[in-house]
Image (cartoon, helix red, strand yellow):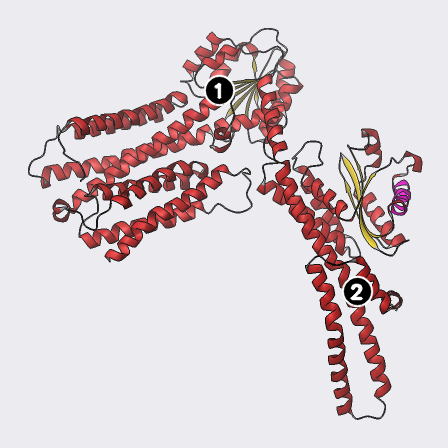
Amino acid sequence: MLTLIQIMEVALPVLYAGIFLVYLHHFLKESTTSARPFIGAHLLYGALGLHLSYLITRGIHLDHIPVSSRAEFLSLVAFCIALVYAFVDRKHGEANTGVFFLAMTVTTQAWSSVLMEPTSPAQLLIDYPIYGVHVLFTVLGFASLAVSALYALMYILLSRQLKSRNLGAIFRRLPPLSSLENMSRLATLCGIILLGIGLATGHFVGLYVLEEFNFLDPKIVITYVAWIGYAVGYLIVKTRGLSGLRMGYLALGAYLTLIAAMVIVNTFSATFHSFQ
Amino acid sequence: MASHKQLTAISFSHHNTGLDERDALSFHDEECDRFVSACRELWHWEAAVLSTCNRTEFYLYGAGGDEEMWSCVKSVISDVRALSLEAIPQPAIFRDDAAARHVFRVAASLESVALGENEILGQVKDVHQRILEHDGSSPVLDQLFQYAIRVGKRVRTETALCEGILSISSAAVDLATKIFGDFASREILIVGAGQTAEKTAMHFQRSGATQFSVLNRSEDRGRRVAEQLSGVYRPLDELVEACIEADVAVFATGARDHLLDYKQMKRVMKARQHRPIFLIDISNPRNIDPEVTRLGSAFLYNMNDLEQVVEANLESRREQIPAACQIIDHMVEEWERWHDTMQVTPTIASLARFFEQIRSEELDRQYNGISDEKRQMLDDFSRGLVKKLLHNPIMYLRQSVDDDSLRTEDLHIVRSLYNLDSIDENSDEN
């Protein structure tokens, strides 16, 4: 089984890199009226299937959900970004943005494969699999918010090109502003739901599994504040029908603030929630 | 008339004729059929006519030199279109591969007035359809137009020659699409009811817009345009309120001052909670204060901006010409190969017919007084012998097509050696 796992660790970044090239070609090609259907999405579904098989196989081999080491965490991040993108792409059918998400996936999975060790210490995960579920949903939630922020960035870039009348490559390749906005919103909604499940399961772990748990841990506080901020913001935007460049800046700014807060907390506070 | 059949294209287009001449030479469907029938009946040519608003072209496959064919075609044109011979201008004439290259360039829209336009490919397909529907087969022109359609499709899918918009109102619609995706649930505001405003509104309607508001000083004209668009008329003093509701606003009036200034637009943006709005100002002088662009989600394009977009698109299309030419070069090579094969196929068929004729004549002489068993034996033997005798010449001809070494003289020698032309004539008569 270990050999199979190691083969998949090599195959995954190679496969994602191949799919990245397919999406890059699609993004760069001159004509937008191809006679052949785009195969990138199907390849991505295949790669996600393989990645899921890898995570399950490694989980069976180690007897716990593989989210205990930095390498495992990175692989999960890569999987989540690709999964959220594939979902949003399936809903909106805008393959021209895939190249950006695939670039993130390739980089993260390649880094993971380089760092990956055959085993990872995780007594907590073996004893309490719910902890793994918490990590899984939290990472999925953060990945969704990252996807949302990247769509917001594309919205801002396209808006600026339209305003400056500099209708270059990005103008020609990116989908319409309304599509980018809808995709960003869909990813935000996914993020709120998934992060919400992650927080709920984390709460459960804190209350019933861990002997000592501090709900005022800065990371937990930041995550709760971010989740509430996103949820309230999403409801306001949805009910009041807000739209446009300001919403783009808001989505991007919110995510950058969240990441900056996490980096500061990671740097200056205790090592709770850190991966080895 | 020379016996060697050639492909010929006779072209009247915007390159070599004026608008009046092209109008006079324009063929409708029934005239095309009359022309094709005349060419078949009088000279046994394959013929096809491509007649569009910018070109009338005759594609012919048959025997004859440039001048001979042109004078024949001229007489038929004169007859079909009831024109005097003197009224018919001198066309551009392309022969063989140049003719094939010409029709490929036409299908690729490299010869069109608007470089990269799409309509021509449909017109080439129509010509091909008429070739298939016409009585009597036209194998060479059938194949030629199949190649042309393939060229047209490849150029459109493998290059960006046909991408980007080349008219001001289409460019405005294209930019609006980049903001809103589609117009199904978008409100389009038309300020002004002149021709320009109407034309732009029609472009939006053709692109799927259904909700229109028309603002105009003159109520009658405003209502007329609103009715045409199945929209609503509003007086011009409701401009700010109309802008609050609209997603796209087209300004095309003769007003001498700004109808919408920065302060008004600021109010509009606040009221619409900064929802994006696309402002198209195609008036001269401008109707919208350029300062409006300072407002975040207000996208303002005036006439100059749209002209620049069109020019940039045209430049992008021009950049695609070498790529389109590469596809055409490749397809001309393929066409040449097919045509060469077409040249040897009748000779191979005549050779086979000639040998079969000799075989059956000789067998008839030997059949008297011999048993059925011996007849069968002679029949099998003669078939095998003819097959072996023909193997090398046929292989030589086919091979020379494959490796591109076929010379017209080789075909003439083979045909002369066995007097194949007279055999073909006899078989035609029979």
In this view of the protein, can residue A240 be seen by the observer? yes
The C terminus of chain A - image quarter? top left
Tell me the quarter of the picture where residue A220 sits: top left
Judged left or right of residue A236, residue B16 is right
Left or right of B148 on screen, residue A120: left
**Marks 1/2 same chain:** no
The span picked out in magenta is B68-80
Residue A99, quarter of the rendered image? top left
Q: For mark 1, what is the residue?
A: A163
Q: CA distance from mark 1 to mark 2?
A: 67 Å
Residue indicated by mark 2: B347
- Picture coordinates of residue A105 (x, y %)? 34, 40
Tell me: residue B389, above or below residue B302: below
Q: Is residue B69 magenta?
A: yes
Q: Secondary structure at mark 2?
A: helix
Q: Quadrant of residue B4?
A: bottom right
Q: Residue at x 32, y 33 (%)?
A: A146
Q: Chain of mark 1?
A: A
How many neighbours does mark 1 have within 10 angstroms: few (below 14), some (14-19), or many (20 or more)? some
Which residue is at 26% across, 28% downward?
A259
Q: How many marks?
A: 2
Q: Position of residue A18 (x, y in %)?
A: 41, 46
Q: Indicate the secondary structure of the residue bearing disc 1.
A: helix
Quarter the N terminus of chain A occupies: bottom left
Q: Residue at x 83, y 75 (%)?
A: B357
The secondary structure that dominates the magenta segment is: helix
Amino acid type indicated by mark 1 = Lys
Residue A162: % across, % down: 49, 23
Q: Nearer the viewer, residue B423 or B409?
A: B409
Position of residue B94 relative to residue B313, above or below, is: below
